[in-house]
Image (tube, helix red, strand yellow):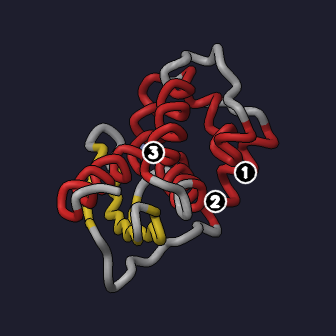
Amino acid sequence: MELDSLYQEVILDHYKHPLNKGLSENYGAQVHHVNPSCGDEITLNVTAIDGKISAITWDGVGCSISQASVSIASDLLVNKSFAEADAILNEFTELMQSKGTKEGNPDVLEDAVALAGVSKFPARIKCALLGWMAFKDAAVRINTTTGGE
Ligand code: ZN
């Protein structure tokens, strides 16, 4: 798999120095997602206060794409409302489904645009989406338990 070298660097940097790694003691929802085709595993804690995501922490093992992607997501989605996070997540999902035809909007996706090239490799898209799908799952559970906004 070949990615743009600058993007490769962003991914490796998140992989080597992951953000928000290490599970918080308290959380609003905890989820565990696996990607059996690659062996990636992520446990993700999401905490929300007044309808705003106040913390995302995670722990995991797996390939550099999966671990870098969850690091990026945990940084990008914190301090957002659930609606804002949902919009970002949809944009990232669209990017991953673009088969290499989209570059992604860096104003919205920030470091996540570094993963754009992954969309050309169907086998790796699940790796990139794993942490984001875990977040989506956790967000639904928090909304259900607290009654939303
Ligand atoms: Zn993987």
Callouts 2 and 1 close, C-beta under 8 Å: yes
Outermost residue toward the left?
145
Residue marked by disc 3 = 83
Nearest the eye: 17 or 48: 48
Residue, disc 1:
10
Residue occupied by mark 2: 14
Residue 138 sits above or below residue 110 on the image: below
* Secondary-structure class at tag 1: helix
Badge nearest the viewer, 2 or 3: 3
Ligand 1 shows up in the quarter that is top left
Could you tell me the amino acid type at mark 1?
Answer: Val
* Amino acid of disc 2: His
Where residue 58 sits in the image (x, y, percent)? Answer: 41, 68
Within 10 Å of the Cα at label 3, are there few (<14), some (14-19), or many (20+) other Cα atoms?
few
Of circles 3 and 1, which is in front? 3
Q: Which secondary structure, mark 3?
A: helix
Instruction: Tell me what residue is drawn at x 53 percent, y 49 percent.
Output: 69
Sequence-wise first label, 3 or 1:
1
Residue 91: image quadrant is: top right
